[in-house]
Amino acid sequence: MSRHIFFFLICCSLCAPAQNKRPFTFEDMMQLKRIGEPVVSPDGKWVAFSAVDVDLEKNTKTPHLWIVPIAGGEARRLTPETGKGEDRIRFSPDGKRVSFESSRDGGSQLYVQEFDTANGTLSGEPRQVTTISTEASGGTWSPDGKWILFVSSVYPDCTDDACNKQRDEEKAQSKVKAKIFTQLMFRHWTSYFDGKYSHLFLIDASCTSAPESSERNAACVARDLTPGAHDVPPFSLGGQDQYSFSPDGKEVAYTSNIDKVQATSTNSDIFIVPVAGGAPKKITSNPGSDSTPLYSPDGKYIAYRSQLRGGYESDRFRLMLYERSTGKITDMTPNFDRWVDSMAWSPDSNDIYFTAENAGQSPIYRLVIDPAKFPQEWLRSLFKEPVEIEDGFNDSPVVTPDGKGIVFDRMSVRFPNEIFIRRIDNIGLTHGLSTEVGGDVETRQMGAPLTHLNEPVLSQVQMQPLEPYWFEGANKEKVQGFVVKPPNFDASKKYPVKYLIHGGPQGAWGDDWSYRWNPELFAANGYVVVMVNFHGSTGYGQKFIDAINGNWGGAPFEDLMLGLNYAEQTYPYIDKERECALGASYGGYAINWIEGHTNRFKCLVVHDGMFNTESAYGTTEELWFNEWEFKGTPWTNRELYRKWSPHLSAANFKTPILVVHGQLDYRLDVSEGFQMFTTAQRLKIPSKMLYFPDEGHWVLKPQNSRLWYRTVNDWVDQWTREK
């Protein structure tokens, strides 16, 4: 079957007659495969990727490797059905081998296996390359295919793996589990600091752990390229690699933050270190974050993302270019008022393709490095700089080896990630022009899908599109909202509302997919879902983002109320007497603020929300966040902390509230949830608390997620269903 038919299935089967499909369920969502970033083979024939399978009853998530022909055809599993799974596949430079990581023999290690370039299959048995006791991940091939770079977390004073192993064994066997802290960031995200730092290691790609090769393997000791008491790369919740090889394989560029007080610093920098060994060299001096170094194929430049303001994790991400011969740094997006996200070089080093969020979408943009080489009209775009070539919510662009195509993943509110392709030759740079795909001419803006792994599930369920609207919000500025209707929608009926408030606060709702806060699933049992991208949201320019700084309960709250007012007045099917507001992280803060400042909702759901701004400061880990958002500390700017603290409005609390919090949430400590629940109970407000002892800021375990959705939806039903 051609890709065009699959494209029709993915994009159009969702709008088939409603009576032919059933509402989306949690069990449906758990059957969906969670597809990772695409990896294109060096010969341009194959796209490999990982896909996570969820086993709800076993409460597990297992990644497996898949492959699909770039010319079109069925995607298929590369690895066996059994086993503990494999992830992060990478092709060797000659395309004849692949590396991947797996925990099949215990902890995560790197493996190499032969790859048949003609048939797209693996041959022989996988060869375990690393045996390091501290585990290995993030494998990347050197350009000559002789080495593999990987990440492992080690004790900085240990000079070999035996030392690390002994230290870990002593800790595990000790009956004393106490910890002594001498610095901040003693815990982060979901774990306490254990004395280890992530480092980059180099190992011979021909190494093996097979017993018959033990004599040769004795020389295969991974070499630490970045020793010391600093994380390389820094902690990240996802995104592009923070390190890469130079095209000649002689050096590695990486990201690290070497500031003494990590808890108050966002000042990561780009360093380069010789592969042969030697001291690293810092090539950036910006006070904000510099990250994601990516060499141009011709070796002349290193592209990276940069934030100019130190201490602010939500400053604009710019695309910077470091010229290796001179050290000159150039801001390539000075007038592009959006955040540069994932990026990729063209093979000829003339262009950089990147994604950037914009008004609920994440298009792919093309930036010409030397505009003089091309006609000026090709530089037309919404922002007068990069050329937008692909609408939708896209990520992880990869340019094909011939430079004529771009492979990327795309998601929507109606479907999770699938892999897509689009041709990007010179005549296909502007909207609506012909794009050659699979031998045919594709005239629509959207690329053609290469995978359709989730079509068996999605073809059976009814999904509704994301419908945007605009209204006049705070400061009389335009603000965007969205509506998702329930299945089997009847315009003559009145529907209750679930009003979702996003976190961040520098985040946004858009035409994307979420397993944790899924608008389609919230709508599935007969609700209209309303969402607003209030001041502080991403995708509308940096001024709009900055408007929330020091103003948490001001303009954002005004936007939320005005946006819901607009929806009530515009969409007659909304029953404004049956509305419940739900939010997590900053959205949780907003719910706590709403509790003390309006009685318009029948119920509230607060997940991991800030209740007391002063206590939240003392129990969080990334202090730069609170110090930026509240313009100081509680002892230097107490007035602002107290101005926007929900707990000081407790006398006004009246609305029934469900409180959700995880014990392992170190971004917003569980005590914030306990304080909200305690206050509601003492005020005799109908309230319930869902407490997860084994979850952090996000609820990630499948069965916990099922309980979360059931509890939240039952709570909303209790207060908004017609009696």
Image (tube, grey):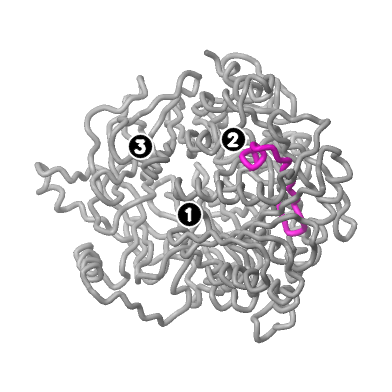
**Does 62 sit above or below residue 700?**
above
Work out how far the residue at label 2 is from the one at label 3, CA to CA, in angstroms. 26 Å
Residue corresponding to mark 3: 92
Circle 2 or circle 1, nearest the eye: 2
The residue at which mark 1 appears reads as 242
Locate residue 675, reporting x and y percent.
Answer: 59, 72
Q: Residues within 10 Å of mark 1 (few under 14, many from 20)?
A: many
Residue closest to the far bottom: 635
Callout 2: helix, strand or loop?
strand
Q: Nearer the viewer, residue 451 or 609?
A: 609
Q: Mark 2 or mark 1, which has the lower sequence index?
A: 1
Q: Amino acid at mark 2?
A: Arg
Q: Position of residue 64 (x, y in %)?
A: 38, 36
Disc 1 to disc 3, C-alpha distance: 19 Å
Q: x and y percent of residue 203 in the render?
A: 28, 51
- The span picked out in magenta is 519-538
Q: Is residue 563 above or below residue 78?
A: below
